[in-house]
């Protein structure tokens, strides 16, 4: 099968197998994984998404450092291709999605049936492969942790990125007033087309002034929930916009800078700071992840959320997918698909 291997840590934007410097190695004869247990399922992968964590992992800058060589990739969707003798939930031909710590940048993957989710009728299969990590993170953060309520003011940083765009959409589903922060006119126009209440273009506006102006125009005091996958100075500025009793969702540090939230101000303003590592729920509270993903798939099938895929590549072009993410060109998700094109369940 085709699989992308990381043979050494380094820059994943260099073409696979091109030179000594390439960290990626594209294999066309990697062994197809065997069913490991009676409840194992082998999935022929249709789509797998590129997350910022995958990029950091190839660079060797992610918190989890697997031994080399490894196949990167975490969330995916596809078609059930083989089932173990005790599998009861799935049959060959079913459409499924899931997530793993490693291994989805390949044509086939094996998972236990308890780790797979049925993709409901009418859901785009490629979109389902983009859902687990990005939408799962924002759903657990906003719905489970912050318990976002209608009319609360949600400020989303990095709002046109993978997790950011999902937070914007989930915020709208929850009935919040959503303020989106992104860089560049194209991203801001896209966010406006999704119905955000206010969008800040960092290439031309100051976040503090722009958000304060919007809050004043709506007679709102401040921000109730800050969703922060960016960090750095943007976080520091955003803290100036928070209400008494606000919640801060620490999601990531795309800027490369871990921000400091002064504890004395958190005390005086009664802020709650939630550190959130979505993947670790799989170990500590797997039911939260499972329920969250089922709700997201239901929302996707009802059209309450949509997945914007700005870039789609084949596995041989994986370095271009990493480049799109690195260059901040993605609006929503960057995907790697197998056999090209989109498949809708009804057409299978
Ligand atoms: N806690 C968790 O469980 C969890 C789960 C998923 C992701 N994350 C983290 O969330 C962050 C975003 O992930 P993602 O997959 O959404 O990435 P992404 O699609 O690349 O989005 C990141 C966004 O951050 C903004 N940004 C600001 N400074 C940046 C910089 N120096 N380099 C790159 N982007 C920058 C960009 O927006 P503009 O260009 O518009 O400024 C970009 O749209 C990452 O740190 C990731 O590790 C955490």
Image (cartoon, rainbow, N blue to C red):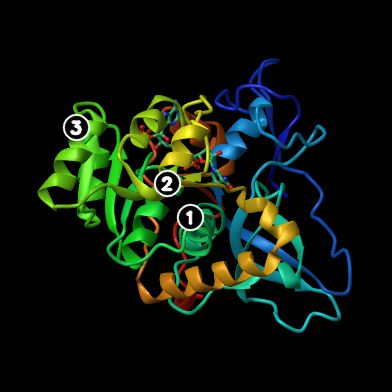
Taking depth in this image into account, of 205 and 245 the one nearest to the observer is 245
1 and 2 marks in contact (CB < 8 Å): yes
What is the spatial separation of the Cα atoms under label 1 and label 2, in whole angstroms? 8 Å
Nearer the camera: disc 3 or disc 2? 3
Marker disc for residue 209: 3
Q: Element at badge 3?
A: helix
Residue 40: x percent and y percent? 81, 69
Nearer the camera: disc 1 or disc 3? 3
Look at the picture and state if 78 lies above or below 160.
Answer: below
Q: Element at badge 1?
A: helix
What is the spatial separation of the Cα atoms under label 1 and label 3, in whole angstroms? 26 Å
Disc 1 packing (10 Å; few <14; some 14–19; many ≥20): many
Q: Earlier in the sequence, mark 1 or mark 2?
A: 1
Label 1 belongs to which residue?
138
Taking depth in this image into account, of 174 and 25 the one nearest to the observer is 174
**Residue 346 relative to residue 20: left or right:** left
Q: Earlier in the sequence, mark 3 or mark 2?
A: 3
Q: Residue at x 60, y 54 (%)?
A: 75
Q: Element at badge 2?
A: strand
Q: Earlier in the sequence, mark 1 or mark 3?
A: 1
Q: Residue at x 48, y 68 (%)?
A: 296
Look at the picture and state if 256 lies above or below 334.
Answer: above
Marker disc for residue 227: 2
Task: Give the image quarter of residue 324.
Answer: top left
**Residue 286 relative to residue 239: left or right:** right
Residue 86: x percent and y percent? 85, 81
Task: Give the image quarter of residue 45.
Answer: bottom right
Task: Give the image quarter of residue 39.
Answer: bottom right
Q: Residue at x 27, y 40 (%)?
A: 187
């Amino acid at each position: 099968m085709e699989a992308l291997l990381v043979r050494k840590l380094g820059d994943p934007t260099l073409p696979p197998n091109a030179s000594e410097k390439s960290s990626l190695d594209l294999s066309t004869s990697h062994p197809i994984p065997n069913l490991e247990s009676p409840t194992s399922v082998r999935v022929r992968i249709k789509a797998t998404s590129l997350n910022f964590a995958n990029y950091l992992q190839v660079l060797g800058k992610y918190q989890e450092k697997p031994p080399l060589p490894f196949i990167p990739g975490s969330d995916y969707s596809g078609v059930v291709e083989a089932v173990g003798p005790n599998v009861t939930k799935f049959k060959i031909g079913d459409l499924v999605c899931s997530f793993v710590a490693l291994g989805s940048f390949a044509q086939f993957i094996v998972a236990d049936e308890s780790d797979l989710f049925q993709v409901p009728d009418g859901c785009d299969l490629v979109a389902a492969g983009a859902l687990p990590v990005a939408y799962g993170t924002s759903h657990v953060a906003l719905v489970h942790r912050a318990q976002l309520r209608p009319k609360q003011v949600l400020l989303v940083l990095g709002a046109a990125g993978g997790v950011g765009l999902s937070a914007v959409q989930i915020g709208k589903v929850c009935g919040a007033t959503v303020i989106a922060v992104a860089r560049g006119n194209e991203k801001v126009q896209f966010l406006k087309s999704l119905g955000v209440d206010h969008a800040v273009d960092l290439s031309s506006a100051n976040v503090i002034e722009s958000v304060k102006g919007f809050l004043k125009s709506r007679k709102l005091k401040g921000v109730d929930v800050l969703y922060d996958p960016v960090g750095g100075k943007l976080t520091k500025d955003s803290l100036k916009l928070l209400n008494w009793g606000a919640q801060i969702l620490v999601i990531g540090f795309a800027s490369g800078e871990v921000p400091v939230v002064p504890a004395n101000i958190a005390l005086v303003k009664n802020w709650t700071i939630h550190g959130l590592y979505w993947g670790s729920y799989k170990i500590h509270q797997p039911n939260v992840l499972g329920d969250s993903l089922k709700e997201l798939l239901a929302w996707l099938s009802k059209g309450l959320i949509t997945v914007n895929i700005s870039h789609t590549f084949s596995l041989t072009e994986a370095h271009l997918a990493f480049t799109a993410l690195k260059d901040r060109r993605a609006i929503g998700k960057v995907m790697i698909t197998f056999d090209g094109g989109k498949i809708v369940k009804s057409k299978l």
